[in-house]
Amino acid sequence: MRPERGKKEGEMATHSYTVLVEKENGGYRAHCPALPGCRSFGDTKKEAVENIKLSISYRLETLMAKGKPIPIDGDLAHSVQHA
């Protein structure tokens, strides 16, 4: 796999994903809608967000290792208006 333009060999591209954080059972649950099954938990919002960053990294590494496409965050995003 060739590095992205402007990236050195072995340097990962930067990806940005929407993460949803919800209060759950006295802690927080975070998940990434663009990466099904990619979720984490934490005692605080900050901890849940830090944990989901690791979860996203592992998921992207797995997808790349298997030669699968990397989802784009906007693939699942829809704007809904309510009157």
Image: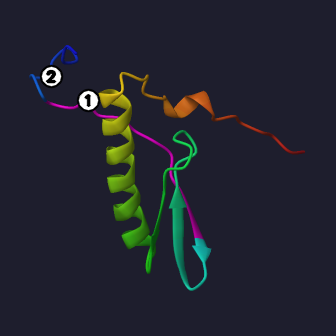
Residue lying at 37% horizontally and 71% vertically, measured from the top left: 47
Q: Earlier in the sequence, mark 1 or mark 2?
A: 2
Q: Main secondary structure of the magenta part?
A: loop
Q: In the structure shown, which secondary structural element does the residue marked by tag 2 occupy?
A: loop
Q: CB under 8 Å between callouts 1 and 2? A: yes
Residue lying at 54% horizontally and 68% vertically, measured from the top left: 29
Report the span colored magenta: 11-22
- Check disc 2: other Cα within 10 Å, few if <14, some if 14-19, many if 20+: few
Q: Which residue is mark 2?
A: 7
**Quarter assignment of residue 44:** bottom left
Residue 32 screen position, x and y as percent: 52, 49
Residue lying at 71% horizontally and 36% vertically, measured from the top left: 79
The kind of residue on which mark 2 rests is: Lys
**In this view, 37 is above or below 26:** above
Residue 75 screen position, x and y as percent: 59, 28
Pick the front one: 65 or 78: 65
Residue 10 magenta-highlighted: no
Q: Which residue is mark 1?
A: 13
**In this view, 26 is above or below 36:** below
**Quarter assignment of residue 34:** top right
Which image quarter is the N terminus in? top left
Pick the front one: 51 or 46: 51
- Check disc 1: other Cα within 10 Å, few if <14, some if 14-19, many if 20+: few
The kind of residue on which mark 1 rests is: Ala
